[in-house]
Image: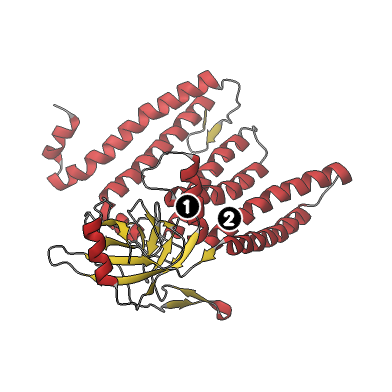
């Protein structure tokens, strides 16, 4: 009879259910520590591990015992974190979904930076790297991992690692997270510039103060952030050529239909585009078509998609405020153009929509809730129902 089967005779059922996972974590940490200790002795036999003296027991632990105990403690810590996550999975997911994409990227980036710092810290204790590399690794890995997460989130859903997909993700990130991306890029430039400044100073003067390196990096960070942000703003185009012509609610489906019209003299590529409602919830525009001049495209939106003007904001110090909504929905294309969707008053919405529905029957996925949000946005929990929408627009 196994140990877990004998537990009910000694403890109650509830106590057994709580003890079994704990015992599994403790038992699983032992082989993990043994494997790490064996690999350490094989791969790095010449690495000096300090011995540890136990004052209460008047005994000194060997380097192998130190590695084993450290690995065992690490395994127990990881297992305990997993048990906590499994126990409180739903509350954790619910709380996590309340954060914006910006906050999620920053938190995950910080976690990645802590892992890098811990690895470099262990290498520094073994004398493999300089202690300053620990701080430098944390400062570089945090913004870099956060930026990569933002870039990955903005890429085309289900796309491969092609250059065009990465470019599309960068364009969407630049339009939706211009301030955040500017700060991240400026910080990376400041770190690289500070290192270059220090090495040049040491090479030329033979000595260079750390305070001068820090001051130069801060000034470079501010300057690079401002320049990058101004560059993003200069290359971002805001257009009003696409307008909302009608919003209908079919009785057979718990969703709504949104029709937009291209009022410009040029075509607009809607593939890989995204649309944001007035509450800053971001959705994927699941159509793969080019909207010709004067044409109308109809697609489904969930009930949670907000069309009403929203002027909600958060007051910040020094008289600043952070907007949490806008007057109209906004369309973001893969080329970087931004279209605030104003309402059209030409009165031809219904006719154009019906005409297009009978003239062309291309399949297009409906707008699906996007788990990616902007700095002050939140994610919609309502999924849109796929349908055959008007993908090949008609002419008026």
> In the image, 67: left or right of 345?
right
> In the image, 353: left or right of 81?
left
Under tag 2, what secondary structure?
helix
Residue at image position (83%, 47%) is: 201
Quadrant housing residue 326 = bottom left
User: Mark 2, residues whose alpha carbon is within 10 Å: few (<14), some, or many (≥20)?
Assistant: many
Q: Are discs 1 and 2 less than 8 Å apart at CB?
A: yes
Residue 255 horizontal/vertical position (percent): 21, 64
Work out how far the residue at label 1 is from the one at label 2, CA to CA, in angstroms: 11 Å
Say the numbered circle drawn on residue 211. Answer: none
Say the numbered circle drawn on residue 184. Answer: 2
In this orientation, does residue 302 appear?
Answer: no
Residue at image position (63%, 64%) is: 230
Of labels 1 and 2, earlier in sequence is 1
Colour scheme of the picture:
secondary structure
Q: Quadrant of the C terminus?
A: bottom left
* Vertical relation: 172 (above or below) 2: below
**Residue toward you, 33 or 135:** 135
Residue at image position (77%, 47%) is: 198
Residue 264 horizontal/vertical position (percent): 45, 66
Q: Residue furthest top?
A: 42
Q: Which residue is mark 1?
A: 150
In this orientation, does residue 263 appear?
Answer: yes
**Residue toward you, 267 or 208:** 267
């Amino acid at each position: 009879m196994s140990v877990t089967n004998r537990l009910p005779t000694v403890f109650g059922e509830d106590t057994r259910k709580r003890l079994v996972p704990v015992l599994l974590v403790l038992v699983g940490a032992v082989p993990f520590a043994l494997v790490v200790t064996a690999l350490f002795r094989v791969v790095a036999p010449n690495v000096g591990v300090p011995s540890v003296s136990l004052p209460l027991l008047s005994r000194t632990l060997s380097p192998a015992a130190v590695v084993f105990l450290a690995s065992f403690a690490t395994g127990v810590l990881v297992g305990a974190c997993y048990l906590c996550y499994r126990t409180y999975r739903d509350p954790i997911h619910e709380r996590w979904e309340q954060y914006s994409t910006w906050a999620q990227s920053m938190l995950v980036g910080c976690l990645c930076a802590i892992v890098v710092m811990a690895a470099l810290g262990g290498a520094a204790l073994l004398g493999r790297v300089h202690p300053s590399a620990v701080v430098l690794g944390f400062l570089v890995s945090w913004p870099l991992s956060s930026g990569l997460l933002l870039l990955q989130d903005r890429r085309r859903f289900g796309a491969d690692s092609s250059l065009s997909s990465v470019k599309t993700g960068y364009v969407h990130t630049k339009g939706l997270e211009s301030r955040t991306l500017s700060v991240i890029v400026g910080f990376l430039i400041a770190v690289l510039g500070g290192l270059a400044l220090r090495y040049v100073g040491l090479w030329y003067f033979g000595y260079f103060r750390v305070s001068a390196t820090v001051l130069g990096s801060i000034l470079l960070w501010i300057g690079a952030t401002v320049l990058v942000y101004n560059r993003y703003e200069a290359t971002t185009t805001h257009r009003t050529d696409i307008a909302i012509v009608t919003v209908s609610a079919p009785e057979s489906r718990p969703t709504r239909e949104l029709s937009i019209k291209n009022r410009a003299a040029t075509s607009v590529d809607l593939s890989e585009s995204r649309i944001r409602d007035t509450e800053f919830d971001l959705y994927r525009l699941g159509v793969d078509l080019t909207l010709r001049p004067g044409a109308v495209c109809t697609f489904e939106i969930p009930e949670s998609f907000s069309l009403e003007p929203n002027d909600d904001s958060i007051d910040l110090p020094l008289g600043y405020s952070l907007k949490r909504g806008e007057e109209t929905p906004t369309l973001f294309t893969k080329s970087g153009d931004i279209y605030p969707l104003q309402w059209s008053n030409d009165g031809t919405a219904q006719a154009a929509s019906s005409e297009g529905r009978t003239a062309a029957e291309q399949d297009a996925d409906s707008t699906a809730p996007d788990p990616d949000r902007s700095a002050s946005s939140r994610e919609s929990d309502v999924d849109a129902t796929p349908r055959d929408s008007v993908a090949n627009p008609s002419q008026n």
